[in-house]
Image: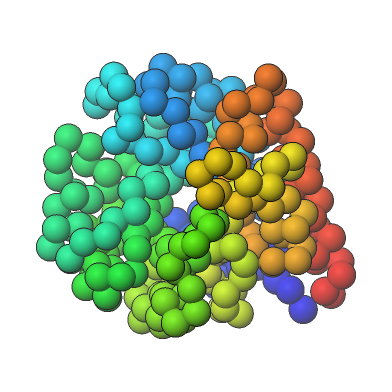
Amino acid sequence: MTLGYEKRATLCTNPTAKKLFSLMAAKATNLAVAADVTSATQLLKLARLLGPEICVLKTHIDILEGFTPELINELLLIAKEQRFLLFEDRKFADIGNTVKLQYERGIYHIAKWADIVNAHCIPGPGIIAGLQSVGLPFGRGLLLLAQMSSKGNLATSEYTQQAIVMAKQYSDFVIGFITTKKLDDDPRFINFTPGVHIAETNDNLSQQYISPIQAITKNQTDVIIVGRGIYEATDPLAAAKKYRKLAWEAYLSTLLSRD
C-alpha cells in the first residue's frame, strides 16, 4: 500500500521534509517551478504569480542580475504568504569545508533562507557532513543528485546506488533525491524529478523531457520540477495550473491503484 503525503509527513524527523509533505497535502499540489530567470524583478513576479499553484520555488540565486539582500526578504515574505518552500539549486560539489563556507558565507548566505539545497555525491560523504553542520541547526533539508535528466550524464548505476547509501547514513538531513524515478522504498525520502514538459521531448542542449503523468505514475516520483514549460509559456499561470492539475490527479490515481 502506498502512503499518502500526510502519512509520510508523520514519519519524518527532518522539519523541512515534514513541512513539505504536510504542505503538499494541505495545498493539493506536487508542482515545483524552476524559476531559471536572470532578472530579480522577474523572479519576484513569477513567485507572486505562481505561488498559489506550487509547493516549491526553485531558484538559481547566482545567475540573478540585480541581487540584493532585500530580494531575499521579499522572496521569504511571498513564500510565507503563498505557502511554498524555497529550493536553491546550488548543486554543491566540493569538499566538506568548502561547501560549508559556500552554504553559510559569501554574499548569498544560502542557509539563512533556502529551505532546501542540493549536492552532487562525487566528493563523498564529507560534502553532506559539511552542509549538515550548517543546515541542520536551521532545520534545512538536502537533496542528493542521484540521477539527472540530461542525455549522456554520468549519474548512473553505481553512482546512484552510492547516493542512496549516503542518504540513509545522513537521513536526519538528507530529505530525498533529484532523480528521474523513485529510488528507495523509505517513505521519508522525497523524489524530485526535473525535466518535466507536456509538449517537448528534448531541447538543443541534451535535456530530455518526460510528461507529468509519466513522472508520477510510471516513475513513482513525488514532486515534478517544471521550468521552461511554465515560465516561457504565453500564459505562465495557466500553464502552472495545467501542470498542477495533471500531477496532482496522477498522484491521487496512484493512491487508488495501489491501495
Name the residue rendered at 87%, 70% in the picture: 257
Residue 3 sits in quarter: bottom right
- State whether residue 34 is above or below residue 25: above
How far from the left and from the top, in percent, is residue 211?
73, 50
- State whether residue 53 is above or below residue 6: above
Q: How many marks?
A: 0
- State whether residue 45 is above or below residue 223: above
Name the residue rendered at 52%, 69% in the picture: 189
Left-right relation of 103 to 78: left
How far from the left and from the top, in percent, is residue 101?
14, 52
Camera-nearest residue between 20 and 229: 229
Name the residue rendered at 34%, 53% in the picture: 91
- State whether residue 204 is above or below residue 151: above
Please say whether residue 187 is visible from this viewpoint. Answer: yes
Quarter containing the C terminus: bottom right
Name the residue rendered at 57%, 74% in the picture: 183
Camera-nearest residue between 120 and 8: 120
Q: How is the image coloured?
A: rainbow
How far from the left and from the top, in percent, is residue 73?
33, 27
Residue 131 sits in quarter: bottom left
Left-right relation of 22 to 219: left
Residue 252 sits in quarter: bottom right
Left-right relation of 12 to 254: left
How far from the left and from the top, in percent, is residue 228?
58, 34
Please say whether residue 6 is visible from this viewpoint. Answer: no
Quarter containing the N terminus: bottom right
In the image, farthest residue toward the right: 257
